Image: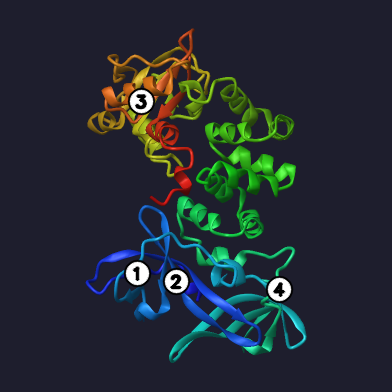
Amino acid sequence: MARLAGLAVFDPAGDRIGRIRDVVVALRGAQPPRVHGFVVEVQPRRRVFLPITRIISVEVGAVIFTGRLNLRRFEQRASETLAIGELLDRGVTHDGEPGTVLDLAMEHHPPAWLITKVAVRHGTRRRGQTVISDWNQVSGLEQAQVDQGAASLLAAFETMRPADLANLLQELPDKRMAEVAAALNDDRLADVLEELPDRDQVVVLGNLDAERAADVLAEMGPDDAADLLQDLPTDQAETLLQLMIPEEADPVRRLLDYPEETAGGMMTTEPVILPPDATVAEALAHIRNREQTPSVAAQVFVSRPPTETPTGRYLGLVHFQRLLREPPSALLGGLVDPSLDPIRPEFTLPEVASYLATYNMVASPVVDGVGRLIGAVTVDDVLDHLLPEDWRERDD
């Protein structure tokens, strides 16, 4: 069943309507659980229910259904269990020995689909033995656990984008969401946290020990880390800042000094910045870094040293398209666009949005009163603040 995660779902006409994110089952004690259907994610990031009775074909890379799909948001009932989200990694007993659920198998026993097999690992992940047993030979699957792992679940979703994984976590109970989040490495968890609603960010961070939480905050973009800290109690936020190394905490502290819906409060302090004697080849190498988001990599900001915010005197920016038109040896100092004035940190959200729209920009430099570049506001920063506060949770 883990192989179903992410599988494309097609209607009879051959149009793809979404992807499977989980399998809804009803546990029945020693009897094999009955499969009710699939949780399917359709755009825009809405999870709906597809009854198993509508499925006409399960093939390699595709599930095909018939009839019409009800686009009402899926809501899990108390009698239902998410097979992938809740049963994988659950501790069980098999042949009198403890084990962990690696996977489940479902089979068609007309007129129903049932979970009939359980793959159980005994021992550790590296030095363990995996056995496949009938459902009724495994006990403990219906018992909630204090500390359930998440390795098998994460393996099923390892290629999922951070935004989609965040959407998956939102559908899980708070306890399970915290367990899955804690199993992610710091970098992956930071990416996922940036995509979660404020309330879920606080839940996840609150279930980490303080040092781990500080490490995750350090992996987040300074602007996202600052937004998250503003939602925490003041003493907790200060504790986490003190646990971060100064080089990572200082940009976050500077952002916390600005009102949230101003250029200073929205900006990232880590745009691509190079000195005027850097070459086009060097600039292209920096924006080619896969860790840069498209909006940040769309331009290079040029300033006098130092080239970390707050920089020396800001000189201007060079658009990505201009870099592609110039020889690799050309110096950035001769390519800056002098026609665009930077914005100030006190600019309001409407003023920043108007600036980006007027000049067809995806990012704007933010310069302080003495001419230093202190950050850049990107179009995705602006959209995050223009959309309703609950937009990450909306399904309409």
Labels 1 and 2 touching (C-beta < 8 A): yes
Colour scheme: rainbow
- Number of residues whose C-alpha sits closer than 10 Å to that of mark 1, classed few (under 14), some (14–19) or many (20 or more): many
Of the numbered discs 4 and 1, the one sitting upstream in the chain is: 1
Under circle 3, the secondary element is: helix
Labels 2 and 3 touching (C-beta < 8 A): no
Question: Residue lying farthest bottom?
Answer: 110
Q: Position of residue 19 (x, y in %)?
A: 39, 65
What amino acid type is highlighted by mark number 4? Answer: Gln
What amino acid type is highlighted by mark number 3? Answer: Ala
What amino acid type is highlighted by mark number 1? Answer: Val
344 horizontally vs 229: left or right: left
Q: Position of residue 314 (x, y in %)?
A: 42, 15
Please give the residue where the numbered disc 4 appears in the rendered image: 143
Of the numbered discs 3 and 4, the one sitting upstream in the chain is: 4
- Looking at the image, residue 21 lies above or below residue 111: above
Please give the residue where the numbered disc 2 appears in the rendered image: 38
Residue 353: mark in rendering: 3
19 horizontally vs 319: left or right: right
What amino acid type is highlighted by mark number 2? Answer: Phe
Please give the residue where the numbered disc 1 appears in the rendered image: 9
Q: CA distance from mark 4 to mark 1?
A: 32 Å
- Looking at the image, residue 341 lies above or below residue 18: above
